[in-house]
Image (tube, rainbow, N blue to C red):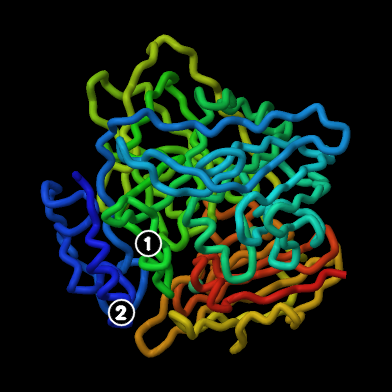
Amino acid sequence: MKRSLLASVSLLLLLAGCTPGPGNQMMEPGQGPKGPDSPTRGMGGMGGHMNQGNAWPLQASEGSRELTIPEVLERGQNADFDYEVVAKEGTTEFYEGTLTETYGYNGDLLGPTIRLKEGETVRVKVRNELDEPTTFHWHGLEVNGAADGGPHNPVSPGESQIVTLNVDQPAATLWYHPHPHGQTAEQVFKGLSGLLYVDGTEQKELGLPQRYGVDDIPLIFQDRMFDQNRQLNYDVLMNNDGTTGDVSLVNGTLDPELTVTQPQMRFRILNGSNARTYTFRLSNGASFTQIASDGGMLREPVDREELTLAASERAEILVDFSGTEAGEELALTDAEGTALLPFKLAFDKEEKQPDLKQGTAGQPFLTEEEKALPVSKRLELFGMMEMVTINGQKFDPDRIDLRQRKGVTEVWEVYNQPDMMGGMAHPFHIHGTQFKIISRDGKEPGPHEQGLKDSVQVEPGERVKLLVTFPETGIFMYHCHILEHEENGMMGQVEVY
Ligand code: C2O
Ligand code: CU
Ligand code: CU
């Protein structure tokens, strides 16, 4: 029993009315899932107001298992639909000899990668084999409200639906996950998430690595916590300000290692956590190149030494391993320097490097007209725990909060109203659109944010202006993507007509 969380402690905390969290002094570092033989970690810098600092420190990956690469979903031969996605219960052997109950799409945990082509229309049969309602939400895909899979599109247990997805947006790394009213956070926590790629032509034109699982690697980062029976006990772990854990999973793999077989690698990173914000670095401090944000390629590639992704955000990066010495220890780490994904280098140095061609640089990110547009929608994020609101209100499925005409561009200003204790960052997400960040507190976004986005981290006291166009009609959610905040009502609806 190398890792056993004292579930009884959690239960006590629960009975005492507090949610387990690292800020809580009742929980000693040594009681984390890695058990007494794990190195003791300091708990410095935490406590006080619930904020990112309040997430559990992550355990380093032992690198004992090769990273799982999700399969690519095959197109079927059926006359009525092209793809089938089934939400189901399963079990996963995270720890040898123990089966953990999990949820997955078409399998036991997570889901296959769906690859759609820009410009195509596909029919996806979605089927719910859980014994609770779920929905199938295509996060970042600009489809109409009926196909979006938000809380208004539930699929009952045992039922299926065929949804038509009209793929009309540039190449991007998107994802899919459930969105049933009140059950999203738990279903995601138990394992329902998958990647959805839009494949376009620019990726080829740019000369990017694109061999799936070889030099084009999906990386879904999620933190979890296991109880003493090594189960994912959401009810006990649930934290109203965002459930975090001390175990880092990548593509559902515990203690992963990635064998790097090419000197130039492309990583498509999804922060699929319920709440945690990650800051990624390379353990040797080397820089890497960010090429894409949530909704596609950046205006131009940007060299970075760290990459921060809030819950639900994605980025694509290129890492050049050619200068790395054999035997050198290298890993993708978090901000604390904890190795989340160690690399094993196994490539031929002679392998030719792809030349990265220019992006769309040359065209400005925003036109003068776009920059001059007045703000027409104002949203104020406020609160913490159960008290979270947008414009003073909690989500009401029967209330339409905003209306916007299809195809008409508006400026949304999102303000994160701090509270007496400072407040916390909220990753703000809008369905049915890929927007541009016009400014943060009046300042133009950095080059790494000069690309399409569907989620944006808004810091306490910060005012972010977004350029928002909906290409399709329907009712779309906007919400904080800390899933527990979303469940607690930090969500509204825009009707696009
Ligand atoms: Cu990731 Cu409401 O969505
Ligand atoms: Cu979404
Ligand atoms: Cu929030």
From what the image shows, is residue 326 above or below residue 110? Answer: above
From what the image shows, is residue 204 above or below residue 122? Answer: above
Tell whether circle 1 marks a residue whose Cβ is less than 8 angstroms from ligand 3: no
Per the image, label 2 sits on a secondary structure element best described as helix
Per the image, label 1 sits on a secondary structure element best described as loop
Which residue: 34% across, 58% down? 245
- Which callout, 2 or 1, points at the residue further toward the start of the chain? 2
Residue bearing the label numbered 2:
15
Image spot of residue 233 (x, y percent) = 39, 60
Q: Quadrant of the N terminus?
A: top left
Q: Quadrant of the C terminus?
A: bottom right
Image spot of residue 229 (x, y percent) = 30, 52
Q: Amino acid at mark 2?
A: Leu
**Residue 244 numbered tag:** 1
Q: Is residue 144 left or right of residue 427?
A: right
Which residue: 84% across, 59% down? 472
Looking at the picture, tell me which residue is in the foreground, 339 or 356.
Answer: 339
Can residue 302 be spotted in the picture?
no
